[in-house]
Amino acid sequence: MPSTFFTLPTCKTCQRIEADLSPADHGAVVCDIKSEGITPEQLDAMKAHAGSYEALFSRRAMKFRSMGLADQDLGEADYRRLILEEYTFLKRPVLLTDSGAYAGSAKASVEAARAALKG
């Protein structure tokens, strides 16, 4: 299965990281999460590597506060449902490979994604 780079093309951080990593040049399929969405199977594969749906969930999304989620006690089923319902809740970008899922813009995550792309 080819690696997949899940991104939001309008996100400046995603643009910067994609330009830096050049995932398509390494054979990764680039997926626009806004227009293409995230399938339950893709999200479950991410979770299998990340350890939890919470690890893939972005609390920075504008809807997190506007929906009152900051005041709720969310569980794994909630994180999964929210990410599938609203693409902005996925911590991005995410590189999904056979060996791992690398989510977000933290330096360590980007460096791990770079290493995974280079094999």
Image: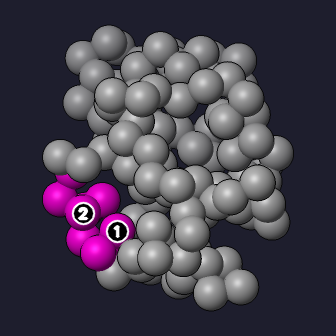
**Residue 103 rendering spot, x and y as whole percentages:** 54, 57
Residue type marked 2: Gln
Is any part of residue 92 visible from this angle? no
Image quarter where the N terminus lies is bottom right
- The picture quadrant where one finds residue 49 is bottom right
**Amino acid at dot 1:** Glu
**Residue identified by numbered label 1:** 18
How many discs appear?
2
Q: Residue at 28% across / 22% down in the picture? A: 63
| Residues at circles 1 and 2 in contact by the CB criterion of under 8 Å | yes
Query: How many residues crowd around disc 2 within 10 Å: few (fewer than 14), some, or many (20 or more)?
Result: some
The Cα–Cα distance between marks 1 and 2, rounded to whole angstroms, is 5 Å
Q: Residue at x 55, y 63 (%)?
A: 28
Magenta span: 11-19
Q: Residues within 10 Å of mark 1 (few under 14, many from 20)?
A: some
x 24%, y 30%: residue: 62
Residue 44 or residue 5, whichever sits in front = 5
Residue 55 visible here: yes
In the rendered view, tell whether residue 108 sits above or below residue 48.
below
Label 1 sits on a secondary structure element that is: helix
Q: Nearer the viewer, residue 76 or 2?
A: 2
Quickly name the residue at label 2. 15
Estimate the x, y position of residue 106 in percent, counting from the top left: 44, 70
Q: Regarding mark 2 in the picture, which secondary structure is present there?
A: helix
Horizontal side, residue 6 vs residue 63: left or right? right
Q: Is residue 71 magenta?
A: no
